[in-house]
Image (spheres, rainbow, N blue to C red):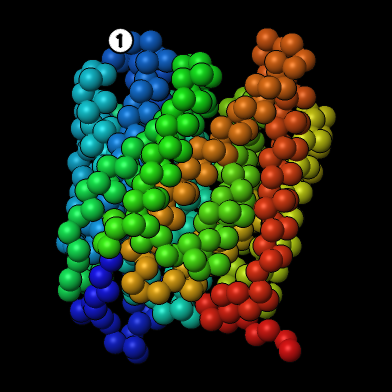
């Protein structure tokens, strides 16, 4: 991996303001991408009716999007260095927006699958390259604020997506769940052209094609297996087989990257303790708990409590408010207590709030439920931002492209792994007590297990030094 210099850097005086504008521009694009992934699930029955197929057949639209995205994510860092992060980011937004148009105009299932596959390619490049742009344009003193801004789409879109999708599908048409991306995409393109500088690496090694094929196969098989576990439509044996194949290809790719002179992905970032812990070990476990919660909460209220979708949406608004409420004080909290203490204490609070959902019942006062969900949202937001920021606190310029790509790959795994773990616990509990459908006790076990995973991961951050990421958080360690 060659080290190169960039050009057209903004002056030191304007760096802070410009980095925040750039982070906001990237966040707009991320919001469009993540919203699309959550909004579409609510309209699958109506789409199936339009296409003249069974609703279960529509799940392929989600699967093909996921798999094409997984296949091309490993390429993102190299492409951003080779062709310029700004140019690749513009291309990713354009591909995603145009594909969204064709998704909305699809007249049959085949057209929809092709459009979703192309959309997945745009999505694969968008997140890691967008993060690279932010890292290139933010000083360490501005990194917490910048990462907080590009993190909020991942916190808010999964919460409001299903509610918005239900509203659009009910009162307009499922087509608008995709067509809504058109104006957002156009705005995003305009903002990128206006505010993001053209920064290119002077010298980039040739594409490590073997490494690309191996890593793409590993991530694709792994995510496919986890997705099929969640869907529960292909049987356990094929799902486990795909996961096993993904692990094998990932190991082969890792060995390849460690042997070649110019690997597609520079794994030296894992030698940095803050990156390794926040993305691979404790960070992955923490994100499993973070990502399982938005999946479990709506099901708890609709299946466990027998409430309507509107009622569940009302509860989620308080969870959503908590996610937003913490943004105003994230920087101050990290400056006052540092990454280690925040990840430990806030992680335990987050885990306790998740586990506490196991003790809710249809007779629990709404006020108590609202307060618990608000606290869960607050702590989830803090955990997410702290993890994402700490991961890049000590990453050098030569490592950031690969580090961003590796982080995106691992976050995709943790996203599906969180849902898969929650779904597996629900099904195991149902099987154990012999129920034909999910009951309240199944959700109680799921929340307890997810909360336990989050609590264990929080305690693992005790091994970090007190001054971990202090240059970014500006936390002053008392001596």
Q: Residue at x 21, y 71 (%)?
A: 201
Q: Nearer the viewer, residue 191 or 229?
A: 229
Please tell me in which quadrant of the rendered image residue 113 appears.
top left
Name the spot of residue 335 as percent of width and height, x first. 62, 78
- Residue 209 showing in the rendered view: yes
* In-image side of 237 versus 128 (left or right): right
Name the spot of residue 255 as percent of width and height, x first. 39, 50
Q: Residue at x 67, y 53 (%)?
A: 457
Q: Quadrant of the N terminus?
A: bottom left
- Residue 36 showing in the rendered view: no
- The residue singled out by tag 1 in the image is 52
Name the spot of residue 139 as percent of width and height, x first. 41, 79
User: Within 10 angstroms of label 1, few (less than 14), some, or many (20 or more) residues?
Assistant: few
Q: Nearer the viewer, residue 247 or 220?
A: 247
Q: Is residue 399 above or below residue 118?
A: below
* In-image side of 253 versus 111 (left or right): right
Q: Residue at x 50, y 68 (%)?
A: 272
Q: Is residue 159 above or below residue 61?
A: below
Q: Nearer the viewer, residue 203 or 182?
A: 203
* In-image side of 259 versus 88 (left or right): right
- Number of marks in the image? 1
Element at badge 1? loop
């Amino acid at each position: 991996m060659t080290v190169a210099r960039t050009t057209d850097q903004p002056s030191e005086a304007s760096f802070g303001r410009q980095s925040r504008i750039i982070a906001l521009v990237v966040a707009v694009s991320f919001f469009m991408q993540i919203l699309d992934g959550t909004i579409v699930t609510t309209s699958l029955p109506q789409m199936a009716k339009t296409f003249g197929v069974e609703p279960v057949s529509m799940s392929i639209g989600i699967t093909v999007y996921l798999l094409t995205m997984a296949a091309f994510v490993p390429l993102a860092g190299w492409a951003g260095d080779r062709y310029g992060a700004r140019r690749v980011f513009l291309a990713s937004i354009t591909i995603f927006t145009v594909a969204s148009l064709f998704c909305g105009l699809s007249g049959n299932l085949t057209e929809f699958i092709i459009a979703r596959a192309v959309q997945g390619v745009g999505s694969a490049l968008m997140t890691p390259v967008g993060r690279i742009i932010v890292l290139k344009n933010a000083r360490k003193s501005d990194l917490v604020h910048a990462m907080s801004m590009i993190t909020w789409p991942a916190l808010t879109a999964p919460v409001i997506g299903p509610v918005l999708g239900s509203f659009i599908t009910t009162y307009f048409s499922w087509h608008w769940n995709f067509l809504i991306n058109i104006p957002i995409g156009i705005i995003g393109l305009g903002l990128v052209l206006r505010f993001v500088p053209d920064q290119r690496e002077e010298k980039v090694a040739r594409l490590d094609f073997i490494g690309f094929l191996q890593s793409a196969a590993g991530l694709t098989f792994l995510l496919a297996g986890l997705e099929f576990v969640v869907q529960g439509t292909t049987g356990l044996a094929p799902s486990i087989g795909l996961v096993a194949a993904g692990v094998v290809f990932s190991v082969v790719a890792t060995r390849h990257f460690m042997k070649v002179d110019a690997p597609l992905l520079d794994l030296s970032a894992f030698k940095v303790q803050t990156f390794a812990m926040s993305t691979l070990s404790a960070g992955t476990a923490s994100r499993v708990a973070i990502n399982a919660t938005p999946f479990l909460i709506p099901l708890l209220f609709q299946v466990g409590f027998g409430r309507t979708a509107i009622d569940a949406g009302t509860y989620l608004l308080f969870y959503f408010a908590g996610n937003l409420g913490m943004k105003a004080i994230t920087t101050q909290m990290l400056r006052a207590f540092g990454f280690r203490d925040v990840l430990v204490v806030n992680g335990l609070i987050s885990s306790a709030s998740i586990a506490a959902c196991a003790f809710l019942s249809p007779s629990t006062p709404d006020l108590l439920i609202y307060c618990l969900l608000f606290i869960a949202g607050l702590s989830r937001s803090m955990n997410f931002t702290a993890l994402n920021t700490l991961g890049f606190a000590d990453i050098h310029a030569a490592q950031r492209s690969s580090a961003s790509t590796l982080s995106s790959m691992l976050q995709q795994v943790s996203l599906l792994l969180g849902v898969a773990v929650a779904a597996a616990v629900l099904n195991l509990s149902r099987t154990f007590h012999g129920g034909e459908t999910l009951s309240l006790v199944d959700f109680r076990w799921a929340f307890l297990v997810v909360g336990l995973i989050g609590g264990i991961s929080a305690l693992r951050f005790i091994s970090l030094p007190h001054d971990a990421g202090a240059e970014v958080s500006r936390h002053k360690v008392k001596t």
